Structure formats: structure tokens, C-alpha cells
Amino acid sequence: MKVTFFVPSMAGGGAERVICNISNALASKGVDVALLLMKKEGPFLSQLNPKIPVEEVGSFSTRKALSAVIRYLKVNPDRIFFSALDNANIVTSLAGALNRKARTCVSIHNTLSQVYRADSPSYLKRRASLMRLLYPRVTGRLCVSAGVADDAADFLRVARSRFKVVYNPCISPELFQKSTELLNDETFSSLPAPKLVAIGRLHEQKDYPTLLKAVQRLKAAGPVSLTILGEGPLLEKLVAEAKELGVKDAVYFAGFQANPYPYLRASNALVLSSRYEGFGVVLAEAIALGIPVASTDCPHGPAEILNNGEFGYLAPVGDADGLADSISRTLSAPRTVPQEAWQRFTLDYIADEYRTYLQELAA
């Protein structure tokens, strides 16, 4: 079986991490794996198995990418072409519509109704229209949680039965190994306990302003610190907001970390404050490492991972008081998480699910 994964780049996002992990795992199981990128860049490139061939379009232009994918499908008719992230998915579905013999699959990693709201800019509305037109025509549609699949079926006006749910592969022996590496960060070490960690892009989706307000409320009751691992366009705005809230000395913006797991190991709790998610990889990773978690009950993913609050406290979206309360309870009375709660997210288990689904698409 041969599969090519197509994404814009190997940037430091959750979908790119999934593609990196699943590519390595499938290659180790004997699957012929290749990558096609719009641009050959991003920190996850260095974590790919060096035996996996990587080609690039050389541009983030949709038009150039479409031409390249059309050629790729013609030259490689025996490969399943599997894409992730919306712009790559649209290119894939367009190319597949022009080559009906090609076996194409789009993967949906986010809650489409939240990304493409009624008040979205016109370019997003055009993209949503293309999705509704093209996604029903691809060979397969994979979603990273049941909630995302339910939402996608409704948003795209496609029967729910035409979506396959496979959770993100995020728990591997490498995760545990990396978490034991030495953490050499004096700033983090000097922060007061309890130490909270948040991991994710500095983007509106992650709703860090609500998290900063929650930290302000916690700080009023005693020492606390928050370390945010991630980069993005909102850095300056968030730094200014932390200063305005009087928590600048308690908040550390540590940037993107290729290995965030020593930070998790050294923390007292992981916090996810998102407005919406597709899955919430960091929650699964944290509970596997035995780190208590507090999360918003956002659509979709956290409730599935945490079994509706059994394995971690859930707070309403956008509610700073509620999030502060969940964090406080997480610190004082962390949930007990059995091993079977996270074993369903192991890389080996999920790689077998991917391989089975890819075999169905190839048939």
C-alpha cells in the first residue's frame, strides 16, 4: 500500500504533528509513505523518518499547488492521496474532481462551523462553499473526533455515515522518553508554584485572554504562574494584556518548543482554554504523563478525551471565573485517570486504524 500525505508545510501545529507521527508510524509498519508539501519547511521536518521522501510545490499559492497535485496524481496513480488542513484539502478535492480515478481523502482537524461562522470574512465563505461542493466527491473523509464528524456532516450537508472517525495519534514511547529530557530553562524554573502550562498557537481559537483573566483571579488568592508554549500573531497583544491585568510577572511566553513535554512534567497542571478544537492532543498527552488537566468544554474533543469530566475538570467556554475554578479544583483535587483512558490514543493503535482505513480506500 502506498500513501502520500499532503499538507501546506510541517509547521508547528497540531495537524502537522499528527501527519509527522502517523507518517513515521505507518512507515515503520511497512507502508510506502511519502510527503508532498506546498513548502518544505517547519520544525516537524526534522522529526520525520529520513527514509520518507519529501517533495514540495515551492509555493503556498493554491493555483500552483493545484497544478502540482494534478501532475502528481497523474504520475502516481497507485498512491492514496491524503491531505490535512483546509487549503490543502480543497486543492486535493479539486484535483480529485478532475481525476476521478484518483483515490483522495481529506482529513478534518477542526470544528468547521466555528471556523466558518456566518460572520466570517467573504474569503472564508467562498472556501466553505467550495468545501460543500467538493468534499462529497472525494474518496474518503476522516475526522479526528466524533464531535468534529457530527459537525462536519451538518456543515457540509453530507450524510454522517460517510465520515470516518480516527482519533489523533499522540501517545508513543517517544512521548515518555522526551518528557524525561533535561529542562534547561531558568525563567521557567524561577516561576512560582503552582505552575500551569498551556500549549498551542497564539491564535484567537485558543482564547488566551480568558486564561490570562483566570490567572489574574488565581493570583489574587495566592502564588501561581502560567507558561504558554507556542508562537503566533497575537504575542504582542497578549503580552500587553498580561501587563494590563497585572499578571505579567506570573506569565511566561516561552515560544514554540519542539519538545514541550519536560515543561509538562515539571508543571502542576495543563490548561486548555480554547473556544473550539478538533481534538485537543495536549489533553491526551498530559493525562498519559499523569499531569492533571483543566479544559474548556469546547466543541469538540475535550469532553471525548476526558470522558465528560471524569478525567479532568471542564469549564464553560469564555468564562474566566469558571476556568479559574476548574484550575483551582484541578490543583487541589486532581482527577484519577486510569491507563485505559489514554491507551486508545496510542500511536501504535491509531496507526493500525489508519492502515485499515487506507486499505479500505485502496480497495
Image (cartoon, rainbow, N blue to C red):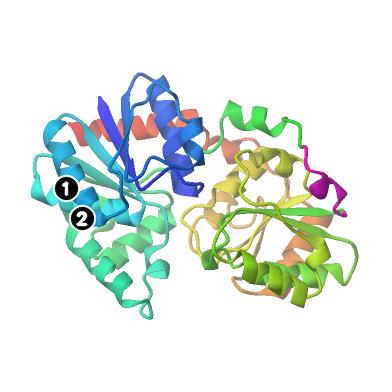
Q: Give the residue displayed 66% in from the left and 50% down from the top.
A: 311
Image quadrant holding the N terminus, namely top left
Asked where in the image residue 262 lies, by quadrant, the reply is top right
Asked where in the image residue 295 lies, by quadrant, the reply is bottom right
* Extreme-right residue of the structure: 222
Count of marks, rendered view: 2
130 magenta-colored? no
189 magenta-colored? yes
* Extreme-front residue of the structure: 58
Determine crowd level at label 1: few under 14, some 14-19, many 20+ residues with C-alpha closer than 10 A. Answer: few
Q: Position of residue 26 (x, y in %)?
A: 39, 27
Magenta stretch bounds:
184-192
In the picture of the structure, the residue carrying the numbered disc 2 is 63
Residues at marks 2 and 1 touching, judged by CB atoms closer than 8 Å: yes
Q: Position of residue 294 (x, y in %)?
A: 68, 57
Which amino acid type corresponds to the residue marked 1 in the rendered image? Ser
| Image position of 361 with respect to 250: above or below | above
Image quadrant holding the C terminus, namely top left
The answer to whether residue 161 of the structure is visible from this angle is no
Mark carried by residue 67: 1
> Please, what secondary structure does the residue beneath circle 1 have?
helix
Mark carried by residue 197: none
> Please, what secondary structure does the residue beneath circle 2 have?
helix
Asked where in the image residue 72 lies, by quadrant, the reply is top left
The answer to whether residue 246 of the structure is visible from this angle is yes
**In front here: 265 or 348?**
265
Q: Position of residue 41 (x, y in %)?
A: 43, 42
Q: Give the residue displayed 16% in from the left and 29% down from the top.
A: 78
Q: Position of residue 354 (x, y in %)?
A: 36, 34
Using residue 323 as the reference point, say whether residue 93 is left or right of it.
Answer: left
Which amino acid type corresponds to the residue marked 2 in the rendered image? Arg
